[in-house]
Amino acid sequence: MGAVAAVAALAMAVSRVWVGADYPHDVMAGVLVGGLVALMSMLVLRRWSRSVDRWIGSSRLRRLLSAS
């Protein structure tokens, strides 16, 4: 799923330059910022996912966790 999302994002970035909606450096800056946000989010979620899982498992939200 991540590979499909990456290809779609690349296609959208190229199309924005192709139709003249953005300059290439604007698109590259967006790719850089988006990549850094995704990396930081992934690192934070990896670190805190176990504690959040335990917190949800011990609360009334347990049914939602087990349903998925």
Image (tube, helix red, strand yellow):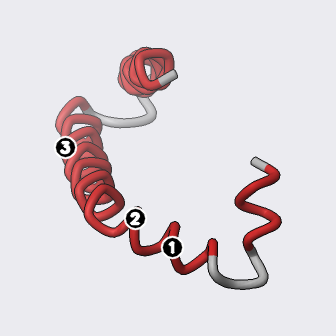
Q: Of helix, strand and loop, which one carries label 1?
A: helix
Q: Position of residue 49 (x, y in %)?
A: 40, 63
Give the x, y percent position of residue 48: 34, 69
Residue 42 has which mark?
A: none
Residue type at numbered disc 2: Arg
| Residue denoted by label 1 | 54
Q: Amino acid at mark 3?
A: Leu
Front residue of 46/39: it is 46
> Which of disc 1 and disc 3 is earlier in sequence?
3
Q: Residue furthest bottom?
A: 59
Q: Are marks 3 and 2 in contact (CB under 8 Å)?
A: no
Identify the residue at horizontal 23%, vertical 49% (top origin).
Answer: 39
Give the mark toward the camera: 3 or 2: 2
Which residue is at 30% across, 51% downward?
42
Looking at the image, which is closer to me, 9 or 66? 66
Name the residue rendered at 32%, 58% in the picture.
Answer: 41
Q: Determine crowd level at label 3: few under 14, some 14-19, many 20+ residues with C-alpha closer than 10 A.
A: few
Q: Are there few (<14), some (14-19), or many (20+) residues within 10 Å of tag 2?
A: few
Cα separation, mark 2 vs mark 1, equals 6 Å
Decide: marks 3, 1 in contact (CB < 8 A)?
Answer: no
The answer to which quarter of the image holds residue 21 is top left
Quadrant of the rendered structure where residue 43 is?
bottom left
Q: Are marks 2 and 1 in contact (CB under 8 Å)?
A: yes
Residue located at (78% from left, 83% from top): 60
User: Is 64 located above or below residue 35 in the figure?
Assistant: below
The secondary element bearing badge 3 is classed as helix
Q: CA distance from mark 3 to mark 2?
A: 29 Å
Residue 47, position as x, y percentages in the image: 26, 63
Q: What's the CA distance linking mark 3 and mark 1?
A: 34 Å
Disc 2, SS: helix
Residue corresponding to mark 2 = 50
Residue with the mark numbered 3? 32
